Image (spheres, helix red, strand yellow):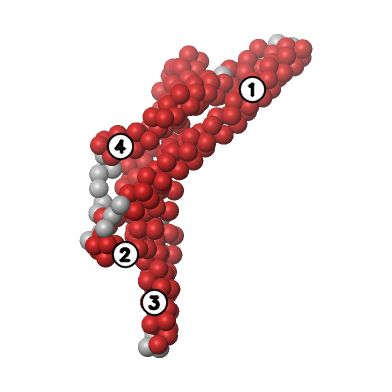
Amino acid sequence: MHDEEILGKAYDSRLMKRLLKYLKPYRWYVALGILSSIAVSALEAVRPWFTKHAVDVNIAQHDERGLLLTAVEFFAVLTIRGVIQYGNAYLTQWIGQRTIFDLRMQLYTHLQSRGLRFFDRHPLGRLITRVTNDIEVLNEMFSSGIVMVFSDVFTIAGILYFMFSMNWRLALWSLSVLPLLFYGTFLFRRKAREAYREVRIQIARINTFMQEHITGMTVDQIFNREKKSFQKFSDINATHRDAKLLE
């Protein structure tokens, strides 16, 4: 059984610490990204207040000028939020790409230091998958995952604050569905991990098959094995397709 076929823990603290070390050179950019995410969350959280003020005060009192002023302020808040969100998206993507670059270069340097026996034991296609596809998957975690955790926490906190400050009874009724949401999230996470693992396995098999058979294409042609190789690749490709559909 290869390493990628082993389903590890859902959260590995030691592995996470190793990955977070790659963010250390960009820690100030990460801090700026977190601050901008908090600002976006704060501006998002005040949106219900404008709706409440427009309906309960301006419209209820037939204050057309006040309603116009509320609309202008609301538009200004949306504009500022859009600008900050754009800058945050650019910054987080920059962090992610730089981190992925460093990680990929370190892995390639590590492969160059391995002996010939290492490459005899490990198929080249599987190693190519590690350097390309597997590392690219980490881009989302480095670019937006870590920063968005803080953003989501502050967004939820702000929404809960406004909900309970407006009507705590209605807020409790609204939150009564949370147990079902948590249970659904737990089921989805378990199924998603299994499906994602299967997709990784099939991608590695495709890359391994392609590398071995393109390199040895002359052997296939000499022994007239083109149809058998085609059928085998078709089966592997179909398995990957089915796994991807279930992801």
Q: Where is mark 2, residue-wise? A: 123
Q: In which quarter of the image is the C terminus?
A: bottom left
Secondary structure under tag 3 reads loop
**Kind of residue at disc 4:** Arg
Earlier sequence position, callout 1 versus callout 2? 1
The image quarter containing residue 12 is top left
Of residue 74 and residue 215, the one placed in the foreground of this image is 215
Residue at 64% over, 22% down? 80
**Disc number placed over residue 18 in the picture, else none:** 4
What separation in Å lies between label 1 and label 4 (alpha carbons)?
36 Å
Can residue 227 be seen by looking at this rendering?
A: no
- x then y, percent, for residue 134: 39, 51
Earlier sequence position, callout 2 versus callout 4? 4
**Disc number placed over residue 147 in the picture, else none:** none
Residue at 26% over, 51% down? 7
Q: Where is mark 1, residue-wise? A: 80
**Kind of residue at disc 1:** Ile
| In front: label 3 or label 4 | 3
Whether 3 is drawn above or below 175: the answer is below
Q: Where is mark 3, residue-wise? A: 216
Secondary structure under tag 4 reads helix
Give left or right: position of 208 versus 9. right
